[in-house]
Amino acid sequence: MKELQYLNRYFFKYKNKLIAGIIFVFASNYFRILQPQMIREALDLVMDNIQIYQLLEDGNIRDTLVKQLGALLLEFGGLVLILALIMGAFMYLMRQTIIVMSRLIEYDLRKVIYEKFQLLSVEFYKRNNTGDLMARILEDVSKVRMYLGPAILYGINLTALFILAISSMVNVSLELTLYALAPLPILSISIYYISSLINKKSTKIQEQLGYLNTVVQEVFSGIRVVKSYAQENSVGENFANQSQNYKVKSMELARVNAFFYPLMLLLVGASTIVTVFIGGKMVLAGKISPGNIAEFVIYVNMLTWPVTAIGWVASIIQQASVSQKRINIVLNEELQVVNAESPLSENIKGDIQFKNVSFTYPDSGIEALKNLSFDLKAGQKMAIIGRTGGGKTTIAELLLRNYDVSAGEILIDQTNIKEHELQNLRSRLGYVPQDSFLFSDTISKNVAFGNPDVGQADVEKYCAYASIDKDIKDLPEGYDTIVGERGVTLSGGQKQRISIARALIKRPDLVILDDCLSAVDTKTEQAILSFFETEFADRTTIIITHRIYNLLEFDLIVVLDDGRVVERGKHQELLEKKGYYADLFHKQSLEKESI
């Protein structure tokens, strides 16, 4: 129960429903307990009247006695029926409180987990598989809800029924009660032992389920790669093996439960036999009435399902504990990027300063930037050029505050980036990553994702700026075309240009293009870059690339190698240095001449 203590805050939040549910459970069981007592009185009445009937000789008196007895039994039957109806009404109310409470907590818990997911850094998502995270917010929360609803309901019901039933049994005969309940210590030991097995096996099942989800998610996301390499059989075999592993673990748990339930029934059956045997001897001794035996048998059988449910409830609690432990790992994850206590939320002009910035990726330990410094004024344009793995994309990650620097500081408008409000900072940045991700929605909604308040006219205008409007109009549904998961129905160049339109429609103060023109032709590239010389001339722009753009005049060009600045300056200055930049320019010029 240690891991489940986190849920106590929700019990306090919905304490009114929980308290009402407990009251309804006890009320329901109170009227249930009265039914065996009515049956006892009816049976004793019958037994007493049978003795009187045998003593009577007058036939008319006998008939009158039978009629009176029949009327009394009918009254008892009606009373039992009324008690059952009242009991049913309270059972309905207890489900409307406790089960509804569990659904409300389920909603709150999923909401809290989702909000935490949104706050966690990119580094967290690099460490964890998407399928496993999905399993935590779906499967694990569902397991926890079973504890919050059915397990608690049956647990309270079991407690209430035990208190009321056993107290009623003790009032009749303490001796017979002790005999009837003798098998329960064996039951307790069995529960303790089997619950530990259930806990271990449930942990393995949940872990395997998370891995199975990951396998499925990766295959579906990369289905084009799977098909292009003709690996359907191999992937299918792997999925079958993992499913078999999950089945084996689930069957092991099922076998434990299959052993547990018959054991419960055996012990309850033993209680019934003991009750009849010992009770019969006590009736002969005149200590109790025959009706008391019937009452005790009903009590023992009344306890059959709750006692049997102990194993089921124990299994649910153990599985919920395992699931809540996995959820707690997410909820207790420390935020690597924390918003400022008194954050700035004003507009960004676009001044950027890197002062002796160094950065090491926490997940891999790779030192991406080493003592990097540069100064970019508002409205200036900067190119970052270098080999793959040189640290170019890391600069964009730091400006977006997906990570915080390991050393040094980044200033935006002469203020440390950590003092800017995160939401405002990211809303003022227009970022186009290397991997152009599109949602499975219409093209219009994908572009408007950058600024949900814009109209269709703005969407089409910025698509024209990104040189994608003609391609869109040629599609059967135009801007209402569904692009498919991750934009699977579009080419690489089309996805890049839609991503650019999505970033530009924000009218950001700072634009970062991370090698996002690699899949477009030269003519389209020139059309897009000309936009930055006209409409976005006053916006600070950083272009991360492997290529040299002649059309766009950069105020600063930085050449990175192994996380360090090896060259900096303007285009002509770098050509005169005859270093990496000059070599790259000459190679690119020769490639253009050969085309």
Image (cartoon, rainbow, N blue to C red):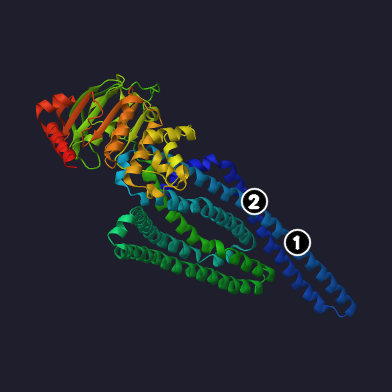
Q: Is residue 500 above or below residue 287?
A: above
Q: Is residue 434 above or below residue 194?
A: above
Between marks 1 and 2, how big is the CA–CA gap? 21 Å
Relative image position of residue 230 (x, y in whole percent): 29, 62
Relative image position of residue 283 (x, y in whole percent): 66, 72
Q: How many marks?
A: 2
Quadrant of the snapshot with the C terminus: top left
Q: Is residue 470 above or below residue 532?
A: below
Q: Give the left or right position of residue 390, taking residue 113 as reference.
A: left
- The quarter holding residue 315 reads bottom left
Residue lying at the far top in this picture: please name it. 414
Q: Is residue 189 above or below residue 536?
A: below
Of the pair 515 and 246, the residue shown nearer to us: 515
For the residue marked with disc 2, what is the amino acid?
A: Leu
Mark 2, residues whose alpha carbon is within 10 Å: few (<14), some, or many (≥20)?
Answer: some
Of the pair 206 and 195, the residue shown nearer to us: 206
* Residue at mark 2: 93
- The quarter holding residue 534 reads top left
Relative image position of residue 387 (x, y in whole percent): 17, 38
Of the pair 573 and 565, the residue shown nearer to us: 573
- The quarter holding residue 352 reads top left
**Residue at coordinates 51% horizontally, 50% vertically from top-left?**
148
* Residue at mark 1: 79
Q: Nearer the viewer, mark 1 or mark 2?
A: 2
